[in-house]
Image (cartoon, helix red, strand yellow):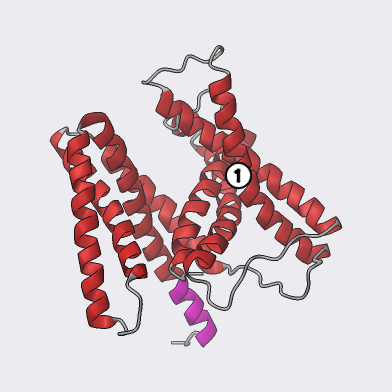
Amino acid sequence: MRKLPENQTNIFTKIIWGIIGGTIWGILFCAALAGLFIGINQNLVTIVSSLLMGVLWCTIISLIWKSLMGRQDESSQNYIITGIIGGFFLGSAIGGLMLAILNRDPNFGKIYILGAFLGASFGFVWSLFRPPIFLGGVRIWGKSGAILGAIWGAFFGTLIGIVATVCLLFWSQANIDVTAGNLPQLLIAALIFGGGNGAIGGTISGIIFGGLIMAPPLPLALELIGIRGGIVGAIWGSFLTAIAWGIIGGILSITIGDDLFLNLGISGQVTLLRGVIVGAGIGSIWGIISGAFWGFFGRI
């Protein structure tokens, strides 16, 4: 049997581990998010207790790990932060799962599946590309400037689009019936549409301005870890995942159509353009959150 070259084997291994890591991250993130919603709506005391216990135990375990495996002169700050973040996710996921089982809520299982799909696709795309390192000078334009402009544009466009759309949602309450029951769906729809329109508009604008005028380099360092890695991960993740999910959203709008988007709180006829916008919105928001998380721990 023919043996694969070493570089192809490394890429294949990286993709496999990216998919596995992304799947675990996606399930944990979506389960934690669902757990918070279920806990707030059904039993706030249970979810708060789960969060406190999760943070406490994960912080203790992180400090024990530091004492056993870390260097003597190493600060405990990063271990404490890791324990708090991990405890928050685990506590909300476990508390929500308990409430979902007690109340026989089938939506929790659907959220697990959605998280696995989102995470696996993110891990696959993330493992294929690395952020471009442009360190040649202050003025970057042409092809390199267009690429950098698209990356920056997708990130800032997503943020601006989300803020603008949410503000419009609450400013136009006279025309929209906003109640406690439909507020979560309206917010989800506003976030997705705002993020999608912003990501697409920002990417196109960034390509034009970066290619013709200039674009700033990414804030890269020798070690992409910690806060600097989180910033780069968020910027890079929003760009990559917005493109990937824009394509997926367009395909799903043709193959599945209205049923999928109605579950997201988005009504009306689903067209190819709306599918691309919805996909780009989901991808850009997911990419910012996931990229920041992975970048913080040096997974760029």
Q: Is residue 217 left or right of residue 106?
A: right
Is residue 9 found inside the magenta-colored segment of the image?
yes
Tell me which corner region of the image, top left, top right, bottom left or bottom right, holds residue 158.
top right
Residue 52, image x and y in percent? 21, 50
Question: Dot 1: what SS?
Answer: helix
Most foreground residue, 26 or 249: 26
Amino acid at the residue labelled 1: Thr
Residue 277 position, x and y percent, is 60, 38
Q: Residue at x 59, y 31 (%)?
A: 165
Query: Badge 1 local density, few (<14 within 10 Å), some, or many (20+)?
Result: many
- Please say whether residue 284 is visible from this viewpoint: yes
The residue at the point 55 percent across, 24 percent down is: 169
Examine the rendering and report whether any part of residue 276 can be seen. Answer: no
The front one of 272 and 62 is 62
Q: Residue at x 54, y 66 (%)?
A: 228
Q: 107 or 89, which lies in front?
A: 89
Name the spot of residue 164 as percent of width and height, x first: 61, 33
Which of the image's four quarters has the N terminus?
A: bottom left
Left or right: where does residue 274 sit relative to residue 260? right
- The magenta segment is 5-14
Estimate the x, y position of residue 266 in percent, counting from the top left. Answer: 50, 28
Please name the residue shown 31% across and 47% down the image. 32
Mark 1 — residue? 158
261 in relation to 287, above or below: above
**Seen from this angle, which residue lies furthest right?**
212
Q: Main secondary structure of the magenta part?
A: helix
On screen, residue 174 versus residue 142, left or right, reads left
On screen, 26 above or below 198?
below
168 in the magenta segment = no
